[in-house]
Image (cartoon, coloured by chain):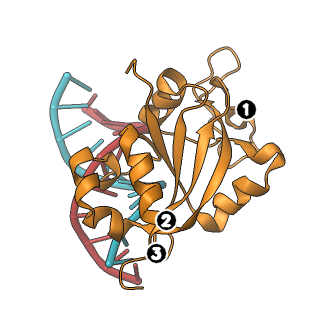
Chain colours: A orange, B red, C cyan
Amino acid sequence: MSERSAWLVKSEPESFGFSHLWASPKRTTAWEGVRNYQARNYMRDDMKVGDPVLFYHSVASPPGVAGLAEVASEPYVDATQFDPESSYYDPKATQEAPRWQLVDLRAVRALPRLVTLEELRNDPVLAELDLPLLRRGSRLSVMPVAFEAIARIEAMAASPAPGA
DNA sequence: GCCAACGTTGGC
DNA sequence: GCCAACGTTGGC
């Protein structure tokens, strides 16, 4: 994956939604707690500083894209893996051989409205882009999306919700 | 609360 | 290396 890419991250708004990111110091937070190798690899190997990131609310009513963020750091070691008090603690990780890395994410702007999963599924332009999010059984919490999806979803957010 | 999908673990 | 059991994710 050599070309500049765009990304989508999932978060549960009850624990950490886009408003939490927006309220973080410098609107930036370490994207800690990712404990899936493929998602880690995207952060460690493929994310570049400045890449756009769609911030998606999962386990929400309704689920959907809430805001736009960007990659704000090079990858670095996720310290929570060493912390027995953390829910992200990984007993198999050692300082010598860390398992988990992360990047910082910075909020760029909230979308004027949530673009729901249902809308994403129904959009013919996005269908062409084959977003991993929309594939059956997609559970990754960090995944690539086509660059063009960013502008498309922003345009959707700028127009009224269907049925509104 | 249900359940499909999928990742991880661990016995063999 | 296989694969059954188990845990988690996440929409509904």
**Cα separation between marks 3 and 2:** 18 Å
* Residue tagged 1: A79
Q: Which mark is residue A26?
A: none
Instruction: Measuring from the top left, give residue A98's x and y in whole percent.
Output: 63, 22
Of A56 and C1, nearer the camera is A56
The vertical placement of A5 against A28, above or below, is above
Task: Give me the chain letter of mark 2.
Answer: A
Q: Is residue A82 left or right of residue A149?
A: right
Q: Residue at x 55, y 25 (%)?
A: A48
Instruction: Measuring from the top left, give residue C9's x and y in whole percent.
Output: 45, 56
* Amino acid type indicated by mark 2: Ala
| Contact, mark 3 vs mark 1 (Cβ under 8 Å) | no
| Contact, mark 2 vs mark 1 (Cβ under 8 Å) | no
* Residue tagged 3: A62
> Which quarter shows the N terminus of chain A?
top left
- Mark in the foreground, 3 or 1: 3
Instruction: Measuring from the top left, give residue A16's x and y in whole percent.
Output: 66, 59
Task: Give me the chain letter of mark 3.
Answer: A
- Let me know if residue A87 appears in the view: yes
Q: Residue at x 54, y 24 (%)?
A: A44
Q: Along the polypeptide, which appears first: circle 2 or circle 1? A: 1
- Mark in the foreground, 3 or 2: 2
